[in-house]
Amino acid sequence: MTDRTTYVTLAGVRRRGWTDAMVRDLLGTPDVQGRDPRRWSLAPVRLYLLARVEAVERTPEFAETAALCRTSASGAHAERRRAAVLTAIRAEPIEVPLLPRPELERRAVRHRHLLGARSPGPDPAGALVRWQVSYLRHALSRYEALLDGLYGETGRGEAERLLRQRLYEAIAAAYPSLARECRRRIAVER
């Protein structure tokens, strides 16, 4: 029987921060391999000399491999999360509130005044269209919850652009008179 204080199981090596690929590449074959006398299992027990494991952990090759594994693992996780969010944004049905034109205009003007805006300027008709699109975009802000879980550079910008584009396209489909302004905003915000 082997002395358990001088050997480490594969599970123990993993708890020390090793991946299966690192064990295969840096440690190679186990020092002792056989059946576990304490329980019946088809899988053999693989034991590695603790002194050999610690010696490999002190090498620069181990440090580089461990750093690379951590980076690629976190990068792969971030990529999976990004892909899942983009898929959710593409699949989510967007429901634009359908209002009669006078009601939409009234709400858009009220929303604009609540934001503290001043007079519309030289093009009041064009301003009203912009205000209506802004109001509807604000009314659809609940869809921004789809972006939860994306932080920093990991696809957040791409997901935000896709969501804005989908929201403006939904507004344009629901209100064809606002389609031109929606296309303008999509082009500007790319």
Image (cartoon, helix red, strand yellow):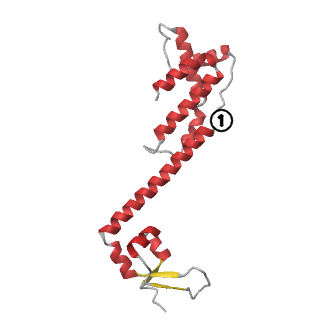
Give the quarter of the image for residue 88. top right
Is 150 on the left or on the right of 60, as rendered?
right
- 108 vs 11: above or below: above
Whole-percent x, y for residue 168 in the image: 57, 26
Tally the numbered discs.
1
Whole-percent x, y for residue 29 in the image: 43, 79
Residue shown at the point (52%, 49%) measured from the top left: 81
What crowding class fits label 1: few (fewer than 14 Cα within 10 Å), some (14-19), or many (20 or more)?
Answer: few
- 62 vs 82: above or below: below
The foreground one among 29 and 189 is 29
The foreground one among 78 and 30 is 30
Residue shown at the point (65%, 27%) measured from the top left: 96
- 49 vs 17: above or below: below
Whole-percent x, y for residue 109 in the image: 58, 16
Q: Which residue is mark 1?
A: 93
Q: Is residue 78 visible?
A: yes
- 65 vs 47: above or below: above
Is 87 on the left or on the right of 98, as rendered?
left
Q: Is residue 19 visible?
A: no
Is 77 on the left or on the right of 87, as rendered?
left
Whole-percent x, y for residue 49 in the image: 40, 83
Give the quarter of the image for residue 143. top right
Amino acid at circle 1: Pro
